[in-house]
Image: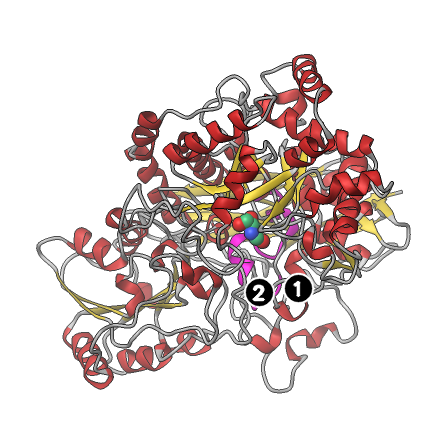
Amino acid sequence: MSVHSMSARSDAEVAARVDALIAGMTVAEKAGQLTQYFYFDIPSPDQPGGGNTGGAEAPGPGFAGQGNTVEAALARGEVGSLLFVTDPAQANRLQRLAIEGNRHGIPVLFGFDVIHGLRTIFPVPIAMAASWDPGVIERGQAVAAREARAVGIHWAFAPMVDIARDPRWGRIVEGAGEDPYLGAAVAAAQVRGFQGDDPGSPGRVISGPKHFAGYGAALGGRDYDEVNLSDSELWNVYLPPFKAAVDAGAGNIMTAYMDLNGVPATGNHWLLTEILRGTWGFGGFLVSDAQAVHNLRTHGFAADLTDAGARALGAGVDMEMAIGDPAYAHLPEAIAAGLADEAALDACVRRVLAAKVRMGLLDQPYVDEDQAREVLADPAHRAAAREAAQRSAVLLRNEGGLLPLADAGSIAVIGPLADSRRDILGPWVFDFDLDETVTVLDGIRNRAGQGAEVRYAPGIRPAQRVFPSMFDMFANNAPAEPAAFDDTAELARAVTLAHESDVAVVVLGEWQNMIGEAASRSRLELPGEQLALLQAVVATGTPVVLLVMNGRPLDLRWAAEHVPAILDIWYPGTQGGAAVADLLFGDVAPGGKLPFSWPRTVGQVPLVYSHTISHEPANQGRRYWDEESTPLYPFGHGLSYGRFEYRALTLDRDRIQAGETVTASVTVTNTGERAGDEVAQLYIHQRHGTASRPVRELKGFQRFTLAPGESRTLEFPLGPGELRYWNAAARDWVIDATTIDVFAGGDSAAELTASFTITG
Ligand code: NOJ
């Protein structure tokens, strides 16, 4: 389904309105429509609803005076879109400038990084993926879309569908992890959530999957660095989530910053035009990442800004996202010099104008400020965020059934992250409300109620980045140094508290400015003194529940041996603390599963479950002499309060022809004493063929709840979509004549197996 066919407005109506607009436009006006500027208007959490910088105090280098420049360009009618405006009154003011500024009265599109919520913050995307629940993911982005549209945003720069296999890369937190099958399902669910059946309908926005393509494979995990991917990896691993997003009707795609196999992604005609538009039939518009067109020059690709604009346009980039000095401002020059083609310019302008028409902007460019307030205050949004946080958590370990906690008693809550309103929200949020954010400590206090004694000690001061984050310029972003903090006394206080309590809940992880864009790391240890704090608390002999607040796997080797219960809560959002308490006390059972293989140590990365088999496969776990080369926790791992047994894996046929479908069924029983949630997973392995295939590949999953003693039989179809793969030798999709092993279970190490044959 394309955006085209989904739109409430007919193609003919859209074309007629676009034709009428474009007919009278000059080349400079057209170039303006293809230019998007940052405009900073971030209500600071200290001044809810306020904080308009007007550009004068715009944050950070490169943004100084941005507001004035942008307003001048708006007044000249040379702006197609703005990003970072989230205040409805401000959006209306700027929209008026835009409309009055151009002879054609063309409104601007407002775009924004609506990554995991606008006011109501949901768990970070990697957490949402860990729910393995497309329904909860779709509902989450529908709430985000509703809040965004209410304040005047038309377009979300989301989802990030980049596969991430190297947790040193900070942006692993924004995606769905290492697997293309899970990644494709999560991508499609998010696009549906943002856009519904029609992004132009009320409460919906255009979805812009990003960053096309391969950005997650940055060399050394260093953000923005070059990417070199084999043909097989590109097609079999990195492109499928984008294809799924396009098939789900995404109205926009954002290009990537880096070089892909030696050519900048933003100047890559093969990628943007031949594959995306040609092979896949993408009908929406393409935007560059911020300053990525301009940067074609710094890449040593384009000679100057005129060349950069001409080559991005030629490659297929419809709109330039500009921090300053747009290359697309040079398009008139490029066309006059014969470097760029006016027909190509027109095609881009048509796509951008078509998006505006479809969003209803020409009929209703302004936003209702009263309605915005109502929508943002909707309690149903908080309820959805709480459910999402419950379903995202992954129970990594639960020795002796320490969880769920018995109701009463005394609880020590320990660690600076346990009571940090800003950190529990995670990165990539700007419009949050700290007053309504529930920390882990708040959540436990509220839930434990009168009978229990809940006491708190941070134990240590927050850790800090060695190099600051570019996001630290926003209010409340960098962890605050506590005033007058006596390290020795505070550690002793935390230890005493643990000693005096029935259970210690220790919250450790990364501060939210340590993960996200430009937040790559060279190590995976818990930053600062956190491991020492954990060890001191465990040494008291009080049972410890470790809650991990993170967006990437961290080195938990010590904890995995010495801490009985480990629950990965990620950055669970506005309602995070409430959801964590629901899980700790067993009001709901955890059921999330890891969307990546959890390495033991940074030296193992990249580490994926779907590696191919080579020499000495029996020694796969001993590829290093100094450490096991297996993961600490496998891809797909996650426990619940029930216990699940898999049996009777059967196939409805033992032989099919290429192109046919076989259906696998398996029965799962909860043999535990409590209800629980499980995600059943189906993997395949191709025994032989015209290329080597991975030892395991995910090809199906289903999440469900079972009462104690209850069973369920699940079916998983395996058809051409699951059995084909991109063959680098044939440079095409193939289904081999072969034998396929099928595995079913609760993680990627599943042992229950059956097999079938594919004949040629
Ligand atoms: C750069 C990031 O790479 C991209 O993901 C984001 O959407 C833009 N900046 C706009 O903030």
> Is 44 on the left or on the right of 77, as rendered?
left
Mark 2 is on which residue type? Trp
Task: Tell whether label 1 touches label 2 (CB within 8 Å).
Answer: yes
Query: Residue sitting at 73 percent across and 38 percent down?
Result: 719
Front residue of this view, candidates 359 and 74? 74
Residue 34, position in %: x, y? Answer: 66, 37
Examine the structure image and report whether residue 369 is included in the region drawn in magenta.
no
Query: Mark 1 packing: few (<14 Cα in 10 Å), some, or many (20+)?
Result: many
Examine the structure image and report whether residue 172 is included in the region drawn in magenta.
yes
Q: Secondary structure at mark 1?
A: loop
**Residue 218 badge:** 1
- 282 in relation to 636, above or below: above
Residue 154, position in %: x, y? Answer: 51, 32
Residues drawn in magenta: 165-186
Front residue of this view, candidates 500 and 709? 500
Q: Is residue 655 visible?
A: no
Which image quadrant for residue 395? bottom left
Query: Residue sitting at 41 percent across and 58 percent down?
Result: 570
Split into 4 quadrants, where in the image is the N terminus?
top right
Which callout, 2 or 1, points at the residue further toward the start of the chain? 2
- 178 in relation to 458, above or below: above
- 201 in relation to 737, above or below: above
Mark count = 2
Please, which residue is most extreme toward the left here? 450
Which image quadrant for residue 689? bottom right
Query: Residue sitting at 57 percent across and 38 percent down?
Result: 73
Split into 4 quadrants, where in the image is the C terminus?
top right
Residue 100, position in %: x, y? Answer: 51, 25
Q: CA distance from mark 2 to mark 1?
A: 7 Å
Which residue corresponds to mark 2?
A: 169
Residue 706, position in %: x, y? Answer: 40, 43
